[in-house]
Amino acid sequence: MIKETILHKTLFYLFAIFFILTIGFPFFWQILNSFKMERDIFALTWFPSQYTVDNYVKAFTTRPLLSYLGNSFVIATFATIFSLVLGSMAAYAIARTPIKGKTPFLILVMSISLLPPIVIISPIYSIIRAMGLLNSYAGLIIVNVLFTLTVVIWFLTPYLHAVPKELEEAAEIDGASPAQAFSRIVIPLLGPGVFTVGILAFIQIWNEYLFALVLNPIRIKTVTVGLKMYESDNYMPWGTIMAAAVIIVVPLITLVLILQKRIIGGLMAGGIKE
Amino acid sequence: MCAIVVTSEYARNYILKEEKMKKLALCLTVLLVATTLFAAGSKEAVPEAAVTLHWYSHASSLGNTEKAIIEKFNETNPNITVEVIELPEATNDKLQALLIALQSGDSSIDFFNADVTWTATFASAQLIEPLDTWFPASERAGFLAGTIAAATYNDKLWGIPFRTDAGVLYYRKDLLQKYGKEVPKTYTDLFATAQEINEKEGGGLYALVGSLANGEGLTCNAVEWFYSNGGQVIGKDGSILIDSSQNRQILEMMSEAYANKLMPEGVLSYGSGDARSSMFQGKQVFMRAWPKAYAMGQDPAKSQVMGKLGVAPLPRGPQGTMGKSTLGGWQLFMNKNSKHKDASIKFMRFYASEYAQKLHTLNDSYMPARTTLYTDKDILEKYPHYSDFPQVLETAVPRPQSPYYAEISSILSAEVQNAMKGSKSAAQALSDAQKAMEQVGK
Amino acid sequence: MKTLTRKQFGYLCMAPTLMIFLIFAIYPVFRTILLSLYRFRLQTGPTKTFIGLDNYFHMFGDSRFFNALFFTLLFTLLTVVTEVILGLIFAQLMNLPFKGRGALRVVVLIPWAIPTIVSGFMWKFMVHDQYGVFNQILQTLGIIDSFLPWLSRDTSARLVLIMSDIWKTAPYVSLLVLAGLQTIPKTLYEAAAIDGAGPIRRYFSLTLPLLKPVLATAVLFRLISSFKVFTVIVALTNGGPGYATESLTMYTMRTYFDAGNYGYGSALATFTLFVTCIIALLFTDVIRGKIDGGKRSRP
């Protein structure tokens, strides 16, 4: 038994080191190079004698990084909120009301979550164009809502099943309508679940690229599309790009670190639904 | 961000009772209001009686010349504001973004920089305004014939040229001088000279480099190789002529040069910036690039070979009569749905005026589209090699005017790469290109 | 005000979602399939000509299509298999009751949380043929003589793409597997040990079969996700060198938006849909399981 534990322990810590190195190194390299001057980046000196914050200044001044960040934030926030509201309503309808057609609906939700965006990109482009919403916030918000709705519904439906029926039934005996029962009893209890899936949705929208590229190529660019804009004169200013990447990534990582319990819980729950 | 952290604190520690719910709702509302204000605020406020034009353009040039030109324009047109919005870097990405935007009937683009190869595409898709009346024949006389031809499609004029371009050969005049070598007139001489210099310098020097990454840059280089060896790509009657013995010969020569490490190994993913970088770091004897690289090569922050660069016309292949350059260049197109056409044309004409083109040439070593500037004293003083350019431009090869140009170019580029990296023989690559091009548009 | 019945309220709640699905998902799918039967491109204006299955005949004679399909299948297979194997290994080790495994689980999250375009650029920078740190490390270790132009050669470009995807996603898969591992009661292991089963036997006869549902779900989602690969290619190679790393989605995007060929592009997109359906059909058990799980509460 002792041998087994020592073996396990060594394996574990070896693995942990390997893991942290492979995952962490690209980030370490990215951050390190964001503070280097161009000639040191070219010469591959790991730890030069001089560092600079010039790349970070350039990241904001050579391209409108602040507006890219703002655009991503607006789109992600609104899309998350809309999909949370609509999604929780739909989840409630499935979990709690005696409507017909639940199975077909769930099949539909599943299909959309598996649908490759390329299949619908051209008609969606035409629709958004016809609505006059190209290069706008609303266009990308709507399209992102489509996909995050499926995430929200998948997550909240079993979650709602776990909410005891008795509370609602008690409210209804007291004379509340289904709508009132929903808003007064169910919504507060949904809180933590909604919050968790909201984070997952937000991250998904923030990282989206394909629709952002096609629907907003000229104005209201998101951060993912914007990062490609740093190339200038067929030349990649790597120091500046690394700095921009750090700026984009640091809030995400902070978010993940603060809310990690929820995120891990949410992801793992998504993985083992039976 | 803070709002998210704050709400997380609430959610973490408390069951959401009504009190907390209200606070959460309040937080969210504030957040929503703030983001809505941000979204609304990003539209500009346009003062009355003044016009703001949106010009979708390249990234600022080396000398920030666009700004100077706009300022000069405003001296005589103070109530027209010109706002520059940058397009994505790669030419293909620019095209994609513009096509997407213009097809939507977007009126916020007034005019934009357009590559010479785009005329047929935009005109046939009816996205741009014909400019015949605004830019009459009397004015066109001052421009190089090739540039006007490139702006014409179906007998109408669609663009105002402000810049032309032709591929040229850059060489290390210090190295050629040191070993008493002439500027090569053939590719055979070029490779021989470079190899000799490399040996005598103790290694570390490549012979040739160009923007050979998959894309329009490669098409330009390849077209130059083919035409410099007496071959063609598309005949005047539209027939596909890419599969020929001359083309095979020169493509084999280039593939061998790559296989023998006479070009940097990464060259197949080099854009023009990477190619310039190799030259400016002193690793090349020769480079093929556009004229604007000259000004960049004199910038001490980027270049280690200042004062050592010479420019010459491109060499010819074994079967060619003379070296041929691909004709490039840029022009201004006007969006059909622009709401400020009169104001736009004022600036467009100013940007193509002698003043503006001369400024760009002096600052950024662009090739102007106006004939008179090639005999201009100031320009020749700064760039003596410009005296070679009129002949280069006269014989330069324009790329085919076709609404399907993007597809043809991408086939050419991919098959040339296939031959260069050895996945296909040159013969096979050209034969496949021939077949694929014949299928385009069918 | 007339109060709604539970049933009516239910339909009301579903309505907005259903509308969005209808307009932005169901209709577009049918429209794409329909358009694939037409000749419709930018250069010929807004007229559409019905040509039946001609686009598909063209597709089956299109070598660039087969090239894209080949690469996409290669990419999908290699990434999914590697990620599952690595995921199993990592999860097993993360399940060991040692200090710091909580921190490990958080580290695992980070590649998943960042945009693909960012991780793509990080890798592009690291494998650069003039100033890539990978080249430097490999050269220092004596594995290579001179810096390799990773992205200029077919095989190495594909390899870099695959590695970059594995780096980003294997940690996420390991989290999913870990969740599955933790639902297996320890008592089962103890019983098996008492019965004389060694650790290897326990793993293959006990753990893996019990992990099957989790693995099946993960494989299903990863297969479909890898098949639609696009963004990481944009960041790293843009389909090059030549067409070596042009995925099916990238070819379709170029057909749509570079060549303006909407008819043929729709055929390519329909084909992608077809393959996705086949993949999904292979995993009907998983799908049925998830749908049933949506209809009733957990046992």
Image (cartoon, coloured by chain):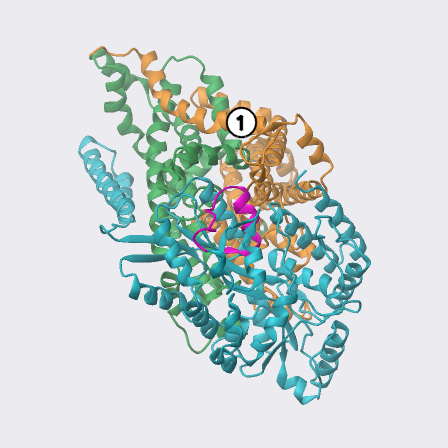
Q: Position of residue B73 (x, y in %)?
A: 34, 64
**Quarter of image, res B354:** bottom left
Side of B91 relative to A175 (left or right): right
Of residues A129 and B328, the one nearer the viewer is B328
**Quarter of image, res A159:** top left
Q: Is residue B116 one of those drawn in magenta?
A: yes
Q: Which chain is orange?
A: C
User: Residue beneath label 1, please?
Assistant: C31
**Quarter of image, res A118:** top right
Q: Is residue A203 one of those drawn in magenta?
A: no
Side of B68 relative to A214 (left or right): left
Query: Compared to B367, does B125 lie above or below?
Result: above
Side of C130 relative to A83 (left or right): right
Side of B225 relative to A127 (left or right): right
Q: Position of residue C269 (x, y in %)?
A: 59, 34
What chain does badge 1 belong to?
C
The amino acid type found where label 1 is placed reads: Arg
Q: Which stretch did the figure color magenta? A: B114-135
- Colour assigned to chain B in the rendering is cyan
Q: Position of residue B79 (x, y in %)?
A: 27, 57
Q: Which chain is green?
A: A
The answer to whether one can see residue C140 in this image is: no
